[in-house]
């Protein structure tokens, strides 16, 4: 079993020396993969040992016994020509596995080296081989196989060589892609700089990367080759006397009414081998991806009990001091794991945003600040959930609320995401996706929605709103997209805008403009803003109040100037100290437009 | 869009020409003694030479190819060497059978693959597990083995459908339907599995995407987001897989037509390739290659219509 050794030594990156062993272990711990590997091992052993373990010759016929059932010395009985079924099955394994082996060998010999060269060196060889690959892949394989049979004669072995040629592009593409991906990696560059020859680099760094995917592909292509070969034999295209599972199926199918059981054995052998190859490939892939069990959501009864408990806890919460646009008390957010206990990422957060207030939620990545914002917006990723606590959006509870009620309450929230480009639906024009909530949720006519959206686009300082309205997301710049997203957040006429790192992905100049827009919206429309950021400069520029988050808790909260100039909590002190002085202490940024308007 | 179309068409034509040339040359190399095959062992060398000259086989292969090409471009694919049938007519007579299969399978695959994939991708849980197992099974078992089981169960044991034969749709619609049902099911299973798997994973991926998350914060109903935004964006990869399945189907059709005794392109291929009848084989190869080119073009156009971004590149 060569695959075992290969898997053992195949790491994904050279740095992870401990990985291969655990991959192998992960593979064996999957029952399906283990059984598949065992089945393949047996089939391969049978194929190799065929001449020694087969009780009779494959074509040793005795017509007297034709169609006789199982009996002493012939556990599977005889076929239509009085040949021993078990022996034919054993020799069939040899020819079936051998044929698939030839196809695989040809495909590997053609596909892997060309893929390596094309991926590593690129240039003209890459273009030419790519074009040839497309050519071969667009040929109907079966027709070519049959046509080549006319030319090359009816031997399975030759057909398998042709098949290997036809499937070689799948290896080429795989290897080329993997190598092209790794070529730019730092450790390959380092190896090149340190003077290793290309051949050594390919052997040491590049081959280790492609080994695992190639093994998976070998199993899949092996399955296809076995199926196709048997299929050809079955419809009578093959080399007459050689015993193969396909030929046995053919013979059994013609004699189905006389001896239906004859169909069972070759069918079983073929089905099991083919399925084992595919399942093993799936198993290796899952083990490499380290794909554990998917987390399972608790059943309905359990969910009801948890919700009831949360409701009871909420009833205990004091009411004073709550109100405003957003009021969060004792929020805990947890994530379900594939195995083991859920992991809590937010441990009891309290947060308030008043009308017309800009509040900053600051902390490092992983501090739970985005999870807090997502909980308010109702967009926690699939496996996360609010474990306990209360979230009031304009005085309406959204935790455990019926989804329609929660959705209505959350219309008071507008969300400005972090990455501008990935947050616009690429299939619809800006105008179409901005008017949709107005028409569907707000009941506006098409024309009214269009006017409103154009006004919004103007409000976020887009110079040519008509053009942007007609554009698709890929036709506008990142800064423009972020303005569009702010306009989108405003389209439901929210009283609170929740902005999750709204400037991180933007150029510095565009950052200042976007912050200016947020400030003006507060000044002109009186909306509240909750801005999630790791950037103290943004906080200093924009926020009235700031909440500092660390490790799932709010460690300090207060007026912005007070927190930034006299931080009390050690974490805040470290945070402030780590920022270059001028960023925090410089005068708050002023919107040029506002200054102009004021003067 | 127009530039994209022109480029695609140009590369498709180049592809067809190269395919034609390669096939023709490869087929011609070992076929130097067609005259003897046709006239038998007793024929005189003179008669054989005359026959070869009549078929144009005494000329260099490339000359033969250009001769074939110029005729083919005018729609004349020549005559079979062995039965002297007109190639275009012979193929045309059998095309409806295979087209019935192809269209049936594509419809079944598109509808059921899509439904199953969306169902699994949105509901997850038990439904998802079922679709996953079905997909692996569809991929893991050789198609003809599944076909054998279907024939034995539904035609032989239950007798619901004929095991063999074909009724043209022009003769009897119900007859046509009963002869085409089992072949279509046989060919569809693996294709449905493949498409369902692809639709499932792209539905899951798109559902988790940033823009869907942002859309949900704008108060749109979940159902609307699913049908308008998730499905549209998840459709492009599904269409690609559907196109690939179609190309693969041409191969599957050969075996299925043979098993069910359908007089289509597949069984025709088996019959004529074993004789080395070049005019017919060339006709078949070109027909399938053109079919593949058209399907790929349609898939690209559909993706371009669905995803404006795809029109740029």
Image (cartoon, coloured by chain):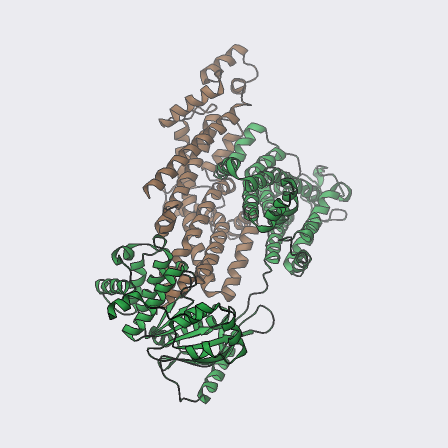
Chain colours: A green, B brown
Vertical placement of residue A26 versus A62, above or below: below
Residue most toward the top?
B46
Q: Is residue A239 left or right of residue B25?
A: right
> Residue at image x 43%, y 73%?
A373
- Which quarter of the figure has residue B169? top left
> Residue at image x 26%, y 63%?
A458
> x and y percent of residue A240 in the render?
63, 34
Residue B169 appears anywhere in the view: yes
Vertical placement of residue B278 versus A463, above or below: above
Q: Nearer the viewer, residue B196 or B164?
A: B196
Q: Is residue B93 left or right of residue A96?
A: left
Q: Nearer the viewer, residue A594 or A370?
A: A594
> Residue at image x 62%, y 58%?
A287
Q: Nearer the viewer, residue A400 or A591?
A: A591
Count of residue discs:
0
> Residue at image x 62%, y 35%?
A156
Residue A350 appears anywhere in the view: no
Q: Is residue A98 left or right of residue B249?
A: right
> x and y percent of residue A347 in the render?
52, 78
Q: Quadrant of the C terminus of chain B?
A: top left
- Which quarter of the figure has residue A464? bottom left
Vertical placement of residue B246 versus A383, above or below: above
> x and y percent of residue B247 in the render?
46, 42
Q: Quadrant of the N terminus of chain B?
A: top left
């Amino acid at each position: 079993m060569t695959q075992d050794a290969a898997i053992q030594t195949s790491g994904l990156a050279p740095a992870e020396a401990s990985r291969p062993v655990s991959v192998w272990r992960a593979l064996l711990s999957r029952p399906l993969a283990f059984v598949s590997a065992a089945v393949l091992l047996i089939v391969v052993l049978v194929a190799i040992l065929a001449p020694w373990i087969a009780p009779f010759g494959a074509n040793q016929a005795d017509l007297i016994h034709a169609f006789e059932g199982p009996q002493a010395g012939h556990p599977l009985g005889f076929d239509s020509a009085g040949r021993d079924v078990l022996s034919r099955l054993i020799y069939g394994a040899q020819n079936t596995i051998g044929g698939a082996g030839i196809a695989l060998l040809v495909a590997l010999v053609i596909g892997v080296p060309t893929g390596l060269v094309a991926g590593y060196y690129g240039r003209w060889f890459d273009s030419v081989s790519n074009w040839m690959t497309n050519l071969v892949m667009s040929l109907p394989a079966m027709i070519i196989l049959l046509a080549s049979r006319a030319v090359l004669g009816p031997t399975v072995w030759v057909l398998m060589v042709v098949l290997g040629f036809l499937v070689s592009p799948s290896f080429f593409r795989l290897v080329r892609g993997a190598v092209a991906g790794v070529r730019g990696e730092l450790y390959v560059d380092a190896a090149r700089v340190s003077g290793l020859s290309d051949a050594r680099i390919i052997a040491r760094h590049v081959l280790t990367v492609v080994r695992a995917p190639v093994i998976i592909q070998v199993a899949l292509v092996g399955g296809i080759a076995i199926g196709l070969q048997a299929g050809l034999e079955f419809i009578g295209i093959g080399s007459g006397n050689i015993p193969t599972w396909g030929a046995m199926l053919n013979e059994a199918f013609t004699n189905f009414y006389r001896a239906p059981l004859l169909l069972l054995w070759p069918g079983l052998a073929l089905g099991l081998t083919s399925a084992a190859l595919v399942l093993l490939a799936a198993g290796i892939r899952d083990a490499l991806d380290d794909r554990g069990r998917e987390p399972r959501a608790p059943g309905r009864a359990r969910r009801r009990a948890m919700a009831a408990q949360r409701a009871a806890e909420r009833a205990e919460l004091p009411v004073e001091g709550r109100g405003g646009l957003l009021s969060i008390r004792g929020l805990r957010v947890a994530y379900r794991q594939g195995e083991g206990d859920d992991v809590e990422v937010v441990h009891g957060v309290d947060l308030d945003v008043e009308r017309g207030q800009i509040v900053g939620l600051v902390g490092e990545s992983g501090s739970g600040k985005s999870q807090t914002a997502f909980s308010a917006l109702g967009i926690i990723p699939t496996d996360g959930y609010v474990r306990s606590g209360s979230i009031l959006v304009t005085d309406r509870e959204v935790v455990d609320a019926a989804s329609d009620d929660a959705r209505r309450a959350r219309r008071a929230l507008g969300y400005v995401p972090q990455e501008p480009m990935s947050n616009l639906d690429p299939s619809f024009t800006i105008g179409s996706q901005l008017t949709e909530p107005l028409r569907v949720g707000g009941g506006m006519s098409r024309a009214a929605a269009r006017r409103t959206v154009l006004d919004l686009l103007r409000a976020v300082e887009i110079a040519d709103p008509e053009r942007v309205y007609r554009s698709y997301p890929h036709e506008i710049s990142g800064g423009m997209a972020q303005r569009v997203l702010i306009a989108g957040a405003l389209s439901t006429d929210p009283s609170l805008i929740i902005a999750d790192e709204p400037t991180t992905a933007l150029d510095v100049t565009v950052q200042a403009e976007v912050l200016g827009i947020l400030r003006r919206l507060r000044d002109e429309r009186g909306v509240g803003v909750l801005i999630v950021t790791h950037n103290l400069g943004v906080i200093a520029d924009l926020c009235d109040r700031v909440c500092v988050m660390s490790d799932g808790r709010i460690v300090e909260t207060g007026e912005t100037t007070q927190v930034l100039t006299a931080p009390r909590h050690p974490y805040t002190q470290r945070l402030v100290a780590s920022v270059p002085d001028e960023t925090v202490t410089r005068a708050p940024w002023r919107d040029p437009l506002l200054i102009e308007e004021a003067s | 869009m127009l530039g994209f179309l022109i480029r695609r068409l140009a590369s498709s034509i180049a592809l067809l020409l190269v395919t034609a040339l390669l096939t023709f040359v490869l087929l011609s190399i070992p076929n130097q003694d067609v005259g003897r095959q046709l006239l038998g062992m007793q024929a005189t060398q003179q008669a054989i030479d005359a026959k070869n000259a009549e078929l144009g086989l005494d000329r260099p292969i490339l000359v033969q190819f250009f001769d074939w090409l110029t005729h083919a471009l005018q729609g004349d694919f020549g005559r079979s060497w062995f039965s002297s049938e007109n190639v275009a007519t012979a193929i045309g007579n059998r095309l409806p059978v295979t087209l019935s299969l192809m269209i049936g399978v594509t419809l079944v695959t598109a509808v059921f693959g899509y439904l199953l994939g969306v169902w699994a991708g949105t509901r997850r849980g038990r439904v998802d597990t079922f679709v996953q197992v079905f997909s692996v099974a569809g991929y893991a078992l050789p198609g003809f083995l599944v076909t054998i089981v279907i024939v034995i169960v539904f035609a032989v044991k239950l007798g619901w459908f004929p095991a063999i034969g074909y009724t043209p749709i022009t003769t009897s619609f119900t007859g046509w339907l009963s002869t085409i049902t089992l072949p279509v099911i046989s060919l569809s299973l693996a294709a449905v599995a493949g498409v369902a798997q692809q639709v499932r994973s792209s539905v899951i991926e798109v559902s988790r995407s940033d823009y869907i998350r942002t859309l949900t914060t704008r108060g749109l109903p979940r159902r609307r987001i699913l049908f308008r935004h998730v499905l549209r964006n998840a459709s492009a990869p599904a269409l690609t897989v559907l196109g690939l399945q179609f190309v693969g189907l041409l191969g599957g059709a050969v075996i299925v037509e043979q098993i069910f005794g359908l007089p289509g392109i597949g069984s025709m291929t088996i019959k004529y390739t074993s004789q080395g009848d070049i005019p017919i084989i060339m006709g078949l190869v070109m027909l399938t290659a053109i079919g593949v080119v058209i399907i790929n073009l349609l898939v690209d156009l559909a993706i371009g219509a669905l995803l404006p971004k795809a029109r740029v590149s």
